[in-house]
Image (cartoon, coloured by chain):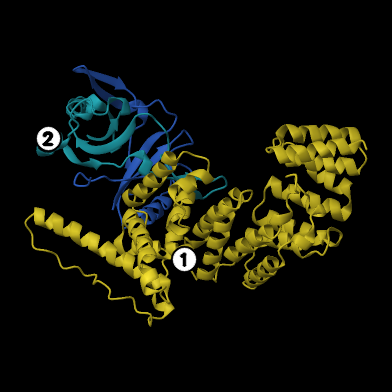
Amino acid sequence: MRFLMFVVDDPDLAGTADASAVPWVEDATVKRVRLEGDRLRPVSDATTLWPKDGGGTFVSDGPFAETKEQICGYDLLECADLDEAVEVAAKHPMAKLGAIELRPVWQ
Amino acid sequence: MAVKDAVDEAFRTEWGRVVATLIRVTGDWDLAEECASEAFASALATWPRDGVPRRPGAWLTTVARNRALDRVRSAAAESNRLRGLAPIVSEEQECAQPDDAVPDDAVPDDRLRLMFTCCHPALPLEAQVALTLRTLAGLTTPEIARAFLVPEATMAQRLVRAKRKIRNAGIPYRVPPAELLPERVAGVLGVLYLLFNKGYSRGELSTEAVRLARVLVALMPEEPEAGGLLALMLFHESRRATRVDAAGDLVTLADQDRTRWDRAMIDEAVAVLDTAFDHARPGPYQLQAAIAGCHATAVDAKSTDWQRIADLYALVARVSPSPVVELNRAVAVAEVDGPAAGLELVEALRDSLAGYHLLHATRADLLRRLNRLPEANAAYEEALALAPTEAERRFLTRRVDGLWD
Amino acid sequence: MRYMLMITDDGAGPVESREGTLLLRPPADAVTVRVRDGRLLRTGGPFAETKEHVAGVELVECADLDEAIAIASTHPAAGRHPIEIRPFWPFEED
């Protein structure tokens, strides 16, 4: 089963623990549970394509929603089931500094 | 001409051009600004000794460019030294003394791509405005902060974040391709118009906005809305001396002393607008300019061609409809067909413009002309409650007092 | 440059998809994992209580932001659902 993992940071917890994801990435990749992933720039570098009334779109600075915690990276996981995905996610350093959201991918 | 004057003049006309070229050459906005500043400082130091160059822009660009190359090379050399590599050979060759014989059109003008990049829709609007003022008009961060009444640190952060986003999000440094041009031109014009209106009461920003609009018209002769915007600004500017009286009170268009309107500016605006209309692609700025032109070219208030103004507002309503446009059309209709006809149109706008002081002021004026004085009084009170400035409040109060004379 | 396109849903109706879109199960099927004071906290649902959420993502590689915007605007969901364009921040960069 594939899961999209959103890595989420909490600005209140920034710097309270080691955030280096490199060991986690290497380990998960070697174990073939992590297919790919990367960091994402913060929402200050985001742009959104909004629907216009009456059809069409317009471009605007900023994310689609303002939240305190923000998506700061993603990984695509291949796991036997949700429990395995949770186990893998819990080992990510950002689980301590924010949150990891697991979303099953429609097959 | 004193050297200081020559440098000031060169700064006003060349800063944007130098910065624009340096951003293209180096890809680094901060480096571009720093090297441009250093080139102007260098001018101040060497022109007294060597004379003012025949082509100050070319001189400044060359000096700034060489400085930038120096810095890029020594940064790279330092990095290579630290990594134990041989010194790099740069593709960009240092320019010899600027060649006065190089024709003007051989020096590229990168201001257009700079303008479009500053006004990219992926940047927050206030950042578009700040970046335009900093890089194209050469205003310093403190000057921009003062103009927008924000702390300097806030404005500095705004600029830092904007440049960071351009880099991190991959906003391209270019004039947009044809299929994107219409919406992107609208964005640039919107920023310039915002600057113009922001600065209207205090002057400095309006002057910069007009200057930038002139640059845009010169660089985009095929875009009639740029001419429309410039003409609109010039028509407004031409009346600056008569907008307020000695006491600081507002003077209506009908009461302004037309002999003190700037005729040269009006003539320029008329010419610019004629050229724009020759393209046969009317748009909202051209139409608004035509309306302003009706007022500017009327010999006195009585001679104003209100029918034409009403027709033009009807056209504006087709291309960019809004309740405010409809309100302005109602004012013109009242002049042509009488206050009752105008009032009928205004009544239809009471819901959509309930919070807009000019709706109530217009309603009040029309009611006054129909001799419905108690209702006029009530409407003026509503306008007063919503009026945004002291000058407007004083004006409306005088109107209320005048009802019962 | 690489970008993540987040096709979002705020309840305006089903989100359209196309080849290349990773369509995600709804937030009700999400699990959020946190570790606090050494304890694993596992909650059903998304990380934030917002009306809007990500319904699908696309990972695109293109020349610049304008191209990313163009790619996003050809998505069948564009014009009905907001699409956020987030640049990648490769580990090798600052």
Q: Is residue B100 above or below residue B291?
A: below
Place of residue B170 in the rendered image (x, y in percent of width and height, measured from the top left): 33, 53
Quick one: which chain is blue? C
Place of residue C28 in the rendered image (x, y in percent of width and height, measured from the top left): 36, 26
Quick one: which chain is yellow? B
Q: Nearer the viewer, residue B304 or A33?
A: B304
Q: CA distance from mark 2 to mark 1?
A: 47 Å
Residue A23's label in the rendered image is 2
Whether residue B123 is visible, yes or no, is no
The colour chain A appears in is cyan
Identify residue type, mark 1: Ala
Query: Which chain hosts label 2?
Result: A
Q: Nearer the viewer, residue B138 or B8?
A: B8
Placement of the N terminus of chain A among the 4 image quadrants: top left
Q: Secondary structure at mark 2?
A: helix
Residue B82's label in the rendered image is none
Query: Which chain hosts label 1?
Result: B
Whether residue B386 is visible, yes or no, is yes
On the same chain: label 2 and label 1? no
Q: Answer few, some or many: residues within 10 Å of disc 1's Cα (few below 14, many 20 plus, some between 14 and 19).
A: few
Q: Is residue B216 above or below residue A31?
A: below
Q: Answer few, some or many: residues within 10 Å of disc 2's Cα (few below 14, many 20 plus, some between 14 and 19).
A: few
Disc 1: which residue: B178
Q: Residue at x 8, y 59 (%)?
A: B85
Quarter location, residue A11 = top left
Indicate left or right for A48 with A31 as reference.
right
Q: Is residue C4 above or below residue A70?
A: below
